[in-house]
Amino acid sequence: MTRTPVNVTITGAAGQIGYALLFRIASGHLLGADVPVNLRLLEIPQGLKAAEGVAMELDDCAFPLLRDITITDNAATAFDGANVALLVGARPRTAGMERGDLLQANGGIFGPQGKAINDHAADDIKVLVVGNPANTNALIAQRNAPDVPAERFTAMTRLDHNRAVAQLAKKTGVTVNDVKKLTIWGNHSATQYPDIFHAEVAGKNAAELVNDQAWLENDFIPTVAKRGAAIIEVRGASSAASAANAAIDHVHTWVNGTAEGDWTSMGIVSDGSYGVEPGIISSFPVTTKDGRFEIVQGLEISDFSRARIDASVGELVEERDAVAELGLI
Ligand code: NAD
Ligand code: LMR
């Protein structure tokens, strides 16, 4: 049976995450080994030539699943009929830039892109925002797309989730395959809260197994929460291959489902669960099935966890208020 190709739009396609992402999408890692794809690459005018170079390399791979590549600096063209959109291109913070300037600059990107998604994307559109500040950029895009169900807009905390899984596996001397039910709460920022209290390591409760509060507070949480900055310091550039890998994982899990007995972390529009301010885009533990996700309910939240979730949610509320004040949502 010949399947209809899925239209996948990638913004910032000529950047370093784009370069690590496109070849894996074209080889079937995003949606499955039997799903053909059309790639729509959105760049700013200065990035178009580099995007053309990447497209030449994609051609040279002769990927059996890759049907068509469009390169454009026009958002309406890029999102026309899009089934999946990976919003990677963003305005990075540069020297002397205040937070308000950063939010304003990104509002100028994610507002119009949200509107273009609203007006041109396919009815089943699924959006993942990677470009930072990812949660608030996703909120801006979502609020500019009133005709698209809010739950189709998500922000990436899967990289944080994967980082936390790897750190916990190292600490407990198991492989990552044995680590389940870890949660990232809150913002993709240094305030995020990686929670091991409901996690399992080879079927045992992770916090009880580790039984080391000092490691949890002084090592694990800060290592995961500040990993992005640590990579920038050591590598001299922001994480790219691991970020692309997490974007692939996020969409693949969203479309294909979480494994029985496990969950993942996604930045999604809060419905007020766990006391998280409704409407903001915050990371939660979620299970996925048939292209939909549900927040894992009923987890007991200790005072230790409550304070950390509240701090990160508080930061997101501040970011929301700041973009509201700037008229971006
Ligand atoms: P990069 O600078 O290498 O590439 C960004 C690309 O986006 C550039 O090619 C640029 O021309 C393009 N771009 C800028 N504005 C655009 C617009 N309006 N439309 C389309 N394209 C546009 O950056 P990168 O390393 O690929 O990182 C991209 C973003 O991802 C950054 O904001 C980074 O902080 C973020 N990031 C997020 C996570 C996460 O876990 N959520 C992890 C790593 C990086
Ligand atoms: C990461 O977590 O690696 C990135 O979000 C860091 C950054 O600021 O680009």
Image: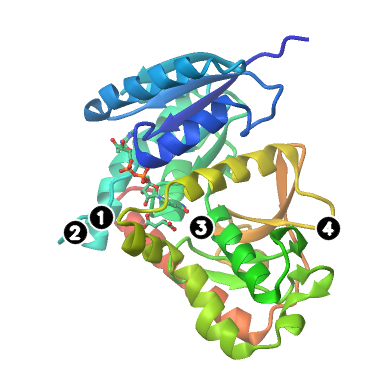
Does the CB distance between marks 2 and 4 fall below 8 Å? Answer: no
Is 199 situated above or below 126?
Answer: below
In the rendered image, the residue lying farthest to the left is 96
Q: Tell which of 318 and 223 is nearer to you.
A: 223
Q: Residue at x 50, y 19 (%)?
A: 61
Q: In the picture, residue 249 is in which quadrant?
A: top right
In three-dimensional space, the C-alpha distance between marks 2 and 4, rounded to whole angstroms, equals: 44 Å
Return the mark for residue 280. Answer: 3
Return the mark for residue 93. Answer: 1
Categorize mark 1 by other alpha carbons within 10 Å: few (<14), some (14-19), many (20+).
some
In three-dimensional space, the C-alpha distance between marks 3 and 1, rounded to whole angstroms, equals: 22 Å
Ligand 2 shown in quarter? bottom left
Q: Callout 3: helix, strand or loop?
A: loop
In three-dimensional space, the C-alpha distance between marks 3 and 4, rounded to whole angstroms, equals: 28 Å
Q: Residue at x 61, y 18 (%)?
A: 65
Q: Tell which of 157 and 270 is nearer to you.
A: 157
Categorize mark 2 by other alpha carbons within 10 Å: few (<14), some (14-19), many (20+).
few
Instruction: Name the mark nearer the viewer: 2 or 4.
Output: 4
